Amino acid sequence: MIDWSIWTFQFAEGRLPLDFVRGTPVASNQGTTAVPMIFSLLQSSGGERILVDTGFASGASMTGPGFKDFVRSDEILVRHGLAASEIDTLLLTHLHFDHAGNLDAFPNARIFVQRHEYESWKQVLARYGSGGVTKDRWVFSSLDADNFRALDAAIAQGRVTFLDGDHRLADGIICRLARDTHSFGIQWLEVETSAGAFALAGDVCYSYFCAERMWPPGYLQGNPWTMIEAIERIKQVAGDDLARLLPGHDMEIFARHRSGVSQGVKVAELHLASGHRSLIR
């Protein structure tokens, strides 16, 4: 069996209203909370590497405050001995600004994204974009138009593969489409390891609270009922205790998994395949 190491890096820290990530009204009027902005690196026991999301090159939070401790995803990889040019497989969970930016830093990567995600956002841009793609408009509250210019350039170069639903990305890795949940065509990953299957839920499940209480977050651009159904599917993979769950924006990631600071950034080591070097000292 091919085993996969799973590392998750925090490339910035944001601050959001608690009900943004946990849900309304159950978490309303309870102030704000720190949230990690993350991307993940998967490495097989055979040496194959897959990058899950890319963060952003620069950006401003839709809620106003800037991000703390920002380090570009390519710089984080360099600090850990991996040049961005060496990434040959890049999986974009969805096309929001904090997940699909900084694409120019990965010029050799084959990019995988759900077709429904890309085409739906292109339709939104065409329909509403003449008024400006700015975060003070709900339709663009999580978008950065520059990301689409970079993605379209990669399409023209023949580097983008569009997925139509669930897809086996590699041995032991399955992309799971969660259509019309957090975004039009967001996907999460099921990753087989020697310790069992991990669910890299991304923004389909913002926090452990959402999974534990089966409560959709306060911010989503799809249907909360379909999100609940997707979370049920994620929980089947992650286990009843959610020990193999990676939610999208929850500081608990670094408490529930083996974690530390490596090369100046927070990292959670969800699973370490035999023969791989730990990043946690």
Image (cartoon, helix red, strand yellow):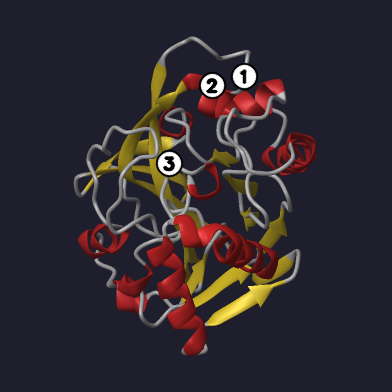
Dot 2, crowdedness within 10 Å: few (<14), some or many (≥20)?
A: many
Q: Which of marks 2 and 1 is nearer the N terminus?
A: 2
Q: Earlier in the sequence, mark 2 or mark 3?
A: 2
Inspect this view and state whether residue 197 appears: yes
Q: In this view, does 49 lie to the left or right of 170?
A: left
The amino acid on which the numbered mark 1 sits, given as a three-letter code, is Thr
Real-space Cα distance between discs 2 and 3? 19 Å
Q: In this view, does 125 lie to the left or right of 180?
A: left
**Residue at left offset 62%, top offset 19%:** 24
Dot 1, crowdedness within 10 Å: few (<14), some or many (≥20)?
A: some
| Image coordinates for residue 212, horizontal then vertical, percent | 67, 23
Toward the viewer: 42 or 147?
A: 147
Residue picked out by circle 1: 24
Dot 3, crowdedness within 10 Å: few (<14), some or many (≥20)?
A: few
**Residue at left offset 47%, top offset 10%:** 30
Q: Which residue lies furthest to the top in this view?
A: 29
Q: In this view, does 164 lie above or below 94?
A: below
Residue picked out by circle 3: 136
The label shown at residue 19 is 2
**Residue at left offset 34%, top offset 34%:** 14
Nearer the viewer's eye, disc 2 or disc 3?
3
Q: Earlier in the sequence, mark 3 or mark 1?
A: 1
| Image coordinates for residue 201, horizontal then vertical, percent | 61, 45
